[in-house]
Image (cartoon, grey):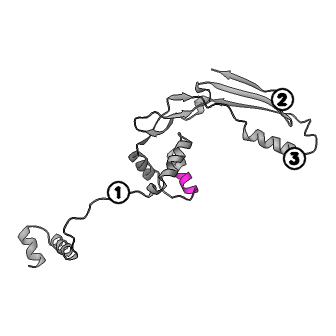
């Protein structure tokens, strides 16, 4: 029977009858899977993405897209990353748990200055550099990524909502007069 007469007999469209006949000739008698393929281009980079999130819980999607493209891993849009993160249960939620960040580290700028002074020979031992820096824990990000049903825990300095000011005199031999003021 022709495709046209089969279409009339079964009450289907002619193009559908032609497609069924072609499938039968190829040996495929079951329908093909419909919809998109199940995978994502990001699946191959899952360990790298999860590592980025573990390293910095409060990372934004824009920052993640930049890191993925800078690392040469993959170039992808924010919305595709959002869908991939949602499927794995890594939601972006408020960070309501304050955890102390531990011992503070010397700033990189101070270390660079000490190295520069050590290299220079003209009166570096008499030079005193006075600097003031401040930190307010309200400047920390309030949201981060965590699995559904789990709390997002990322460190915040002091673990309290405080403003801290550090003033100190820096000599070639080290810090001379450190002073920390904490205001609540």
Q: Which residues are magenta?
A: 65-72
The Cα–Cα distance between marks 1 and 2, rounded to whole angstroms, is 62 Å
Which numbered disc flags the more N-terminal residue, 2 or 3? 3
Instruction: Say if the magenta span includes residue 55.
Output: no
Q: Residues within 10 Å of mark 2 (few under 14, many from 20)?
A: some
Residues tagged 3 and 1 counted as in contact (Cβ below 8 A): no
Which numbered disc flags the more N-terminal residue, 3 or 1? 1
Q: Residues within 10 Å of mark 3 (few under 14, many from 20)?
A: few
Q: Which mark is residue 38?
A: 1
Q: Is residue 74 above or below residue 116?
A: below
Label 1 element class: loop
Q: Could you tell me which quadrant the N terminus lies in?
A: bottom left
Q: Nearer the viewer, residue 7 or 39?
A: 39
Which numbered disc flags the more N-terminal residue, 1 or 2? 1
Q: Residues within 10 Å of mark 1 (few under 14, many from 20)?
A: few
Label 3 element class: helix
Q: Which mark is residue 176?
A: 2
């Amino acid at each position: 029977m022709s495709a046209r007469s089969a279409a009339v007999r079964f009450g289907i469209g002619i193009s559908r009858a032609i497609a069924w006949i072609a499938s039968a000739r190829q040996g495929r008698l079951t329908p093909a899977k419909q919809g998109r393929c199940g995978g994502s281009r990001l699946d191959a980079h899952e360990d790298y993405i999860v590592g980025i999130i573990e390293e910095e819980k409060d990372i934004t999607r824009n920052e993640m897209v930049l890191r993925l493209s800078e690392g040469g891993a993959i170039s992808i849009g924010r919305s595709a990353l959002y869908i991939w993160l949602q499927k794995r249960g890594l939601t972006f939620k408020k960070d309501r748990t304050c955890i102390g960040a531990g011992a503070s580290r010397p700033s990189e700028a101070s270390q660079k200055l000490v190295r520069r002074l050590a290299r220079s020979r003209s009166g570096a031992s008499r030079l005193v550099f006075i600097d003031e820096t401040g930190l307010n824990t309200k400047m920390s990000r309030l949201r981060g990524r965590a699995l559904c049903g789990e709390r997002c825990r990322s460190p915040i300095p002091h673990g309290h909502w405080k403003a801290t000011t550090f003033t100190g005199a820096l000599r070639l031999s080290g810090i001379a007069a450190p002073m920390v003021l904490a205001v609540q």
